[in-house]
Amino acid sequence: MSTVCVSDADLVARARLGDSAAFGELVDRHRTAVYRATRAALTSHADAEDAAQEAFLVAYQRLASFRGDASFKTWLLTIAWHQAINRRRTVNRWWRRIADTEDLGAMDNAAPTSPSPSPEQQAVDGELRRHVAREIRALAPKLRDALLLAQAGEYSYEEIGTMLGAPLGTIKWRVSEARRVVKQRLKERGYAYVG
C-alpha cells in the first residue's frame, strides 16, 4: 500500500505495529531535516551522517514512547540534536568548521563583494570568514547552538526550542544575543557593519 499521502501520525501507528515500510517512509520524509540538524552540531559530513543514522535507530527503538505532544518531525529532530551533541562530546571534535559567512544572513553586510572579487578581496573575505567562525566558536554553547540552528534556515524557532529544551522567547533572545555578540566582537576587530 502506498504511504505517500499518509500522515506522519498514521505512519507512526503502522510502524508501531511492525510495518517497516511505514517507518522507512518516515525516514525518507525527514532525512534532510535530520541531517541538517546533526550537521549544525558537527564539523564533518561523516559525523553528521553517523549521528543522523543513530537518531533514526534511537527513534525506531523509542517509537512506543512517542506520545504525540509535538509533531513526529519535532520529536525526531530533538533525538537527532541530542545524538549529534553526544557524538560531538564523545569524539571531542570541537567546531573546526562552524559556519560560512554566506549562511549568516544577518551578517551579510560585513564585507560587500564585487561580481568578480580581486585576489585581495578574496583574501579579505577569507580572513573575515575565519574571524566569524572563531567568534562563533567562542560563544557560550547555548548561544552558539541556537544561532547555528537558526541560521540553517530549516527549523522554526518553536522546533529549535523543542530541540534545545528552551522556551520560544529564550530561543529568540539567544539567537539575537549571539548575533549581537559576534557583530560586536568583529567590530572590535575593525570590521564595520551596516545596520
Image (spheres, helix red, strand yellow):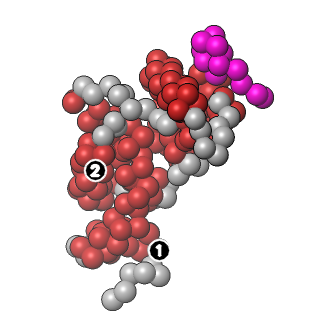
Which residue is disc 1 drawn over? 7
- Amino acid beneath label 2: Glu
Q: Position of residue 60 (x, y in %)?
A: 26, 59
Q: Is residue 46 above or below residue 90?
A: below
Q: Which quadrant holds the C terminus? A: top right
Secondary element under disc 2, as helix, strand or loop, is helix
Q: Residue at x 47, y 74 (%)?
A: 7
Which residue is disc 2 drawn over? 49
* Left/right of residue 26 with respect to residue 192 in the rendered view: left
Q: Residue at x 56, y 40 (%)?
A: 102
Q: Quadrant of residue 190?
A: top right
- Amino acid beneath label 1: Ser
The CA span between labels 2 and 1 is 26 Å
N-terminal of the pair, mark 2 or mark 1, is: 1
**Residue farthest along the top direction in this orientation:** 188
Q: Tell me if mark 1 has few (under 14), some (14-19) or many (20+) residues whose alpha carbon lies within 10 angstroms of its own.
A: few
Q: Position of residue 68 (x, y in %)?
A: 45, 58
* Left/right of residue 101 with respect to residue 184 in the rendered view: left
Q: Quadrant of residue 72?
A: bottom left
Q: Position of residue 142 (x, y in %)?
A: 49, 26
Q: Over which residues does the magenta segment extend?
A: 183-195
Q: Residue at x 47, y 25 (%)?
A: 130
> Which sits in the foreground, 166 or 26?
26
| Residue 15 showing in the rendered view | no
